[in-house]
């Protein structure tokens, strides 16, 4: 069976057991069906970039660190962990009112998808950071799917 070519992306954010956030990128074929058989990032597809809604006027309460090589996700079937999303450090203590609240995360892929002629941007979800003294980092993150 021929390998399906990725024509669209399906980004999502996972809250890991340790409280960190991972950006996951799944791919869909030309029929809009998830491609779950990929074991490596498609070489033609550029790595994603991320924009946070609180970057303007900024600075954002979050930063994105891309993975050197996206790895197959163990949390999202058929997806790749493209990087980590973490609060900008140092974390203010106590967290100011509105800090890290409802930050929309937009993911862009510049090129490489089947039929792609311009960069595409998809909503990965909304992140909210809250103070949490029970966590070593002093905060917790909650993600709302788009």
Image (spheres, helix red, strand yellow):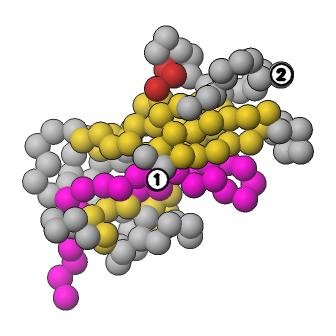
- Residue drawn at point x = 17 percent, y = 82 percent: 2
Q: Helix or strand or loop: what does disc 2 sit on?
A: loop
**Coordinates of residue 134 in the picture (x, y in percent):** 89, 45
Q: Which residues are magenta?
A: 1-25
Is 53 drawn above or below residue 11 in the view shown? Answer: above
User: Which part of the image, by quadrant, shows the N terminus?
Assistant: bottom left
- Residue drawn at point x = 71 percent, y = 27 percent: 89
From this viewpoint, is residue 82 visible? no
Q: Please indicate whether residue 51 sits to the left or right of residue 117 in the image.
A: right
Spatial separation of the CA atoms under disc 1 and disc 2: 29 Å
Q: Please indicate whether residue 129 sits to the left or right of residue 76 in the image.
A: right
Query: Which residue lies under the disc numbered 2?
Result: 94
**Coordinates of residue 36 in the picture (x, y in percent):** 36, 75
Which residue is at the front of the view, 89 or 100? Answer: 100
Is 71 drawn above or below residue 146 in the view shown? Answer: below
Which residue is at the front of the view, 112 or 62? Answer: 62
Q: Earlier in the sequence, mark 1 or mark 2?
A: 1
Residue 74: name its quadrant: bottom right
Q: Please indicate whether residue 80 sits to the left or right of residue 63 in the image.
A: left
Disc on res. 118: none
**Are there few (<14), some (14-19), or many (20+) residues within 10 Å of tag 1?**
many
Residue located farthest toward the top when viewing the structure as drawn: 57
**Are there few (<14), some (14-19), or many (20+) residues within 10 Å of tag 2?**
few
Residue 25: name its quadrant: bottom left
**Coordinates of residue 4 in the picture (x, y in percent):** 21, 74
Q: Helix or strand or loop: what does disc 1 sit on?
A: strand
Query: Which residue lies under the disc numbered 1?
Result: 12
From this viewpoint, is residue 80 visible? yes
- Residue drawn at point x = 68 percent, y = 35 percent: 129
- Residue 19 within the segment the image draws in magenta: yes
- Residue 33 within the segment the image draws in magenta: no
């Amino acid at each position: 069976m021929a390998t399906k070519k990725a024509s669209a992306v399906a980004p999502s954010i996972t809250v890991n057991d340790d409280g960190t956030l991972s950006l996951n990128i799944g791919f869909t074929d030309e029929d809009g069906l998830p491609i779950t058989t990929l074991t490596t990032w498609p070489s033609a597809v550029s790595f994603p970039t991320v924009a946070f809604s609180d970057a303007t006027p900024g600075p954002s309460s979050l930063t994105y660190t891309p993975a050197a090589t996206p790895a197959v996700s163990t949390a999202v079937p058929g997806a790749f962990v493209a990087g980590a999303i973490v609060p900008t450090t140092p974390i203010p203590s106590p967290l100011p009112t509105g800090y890290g609240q409802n930050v929309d995360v937009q993911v862009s892929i510049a090129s490489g998808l089947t039929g792609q002629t311009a960069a595409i941007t998809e909503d990965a979800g909304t992140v909210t950071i809250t103070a949490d003294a029970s966590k070593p980092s002093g905060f917790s993150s909650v993600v709302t799917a788009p």
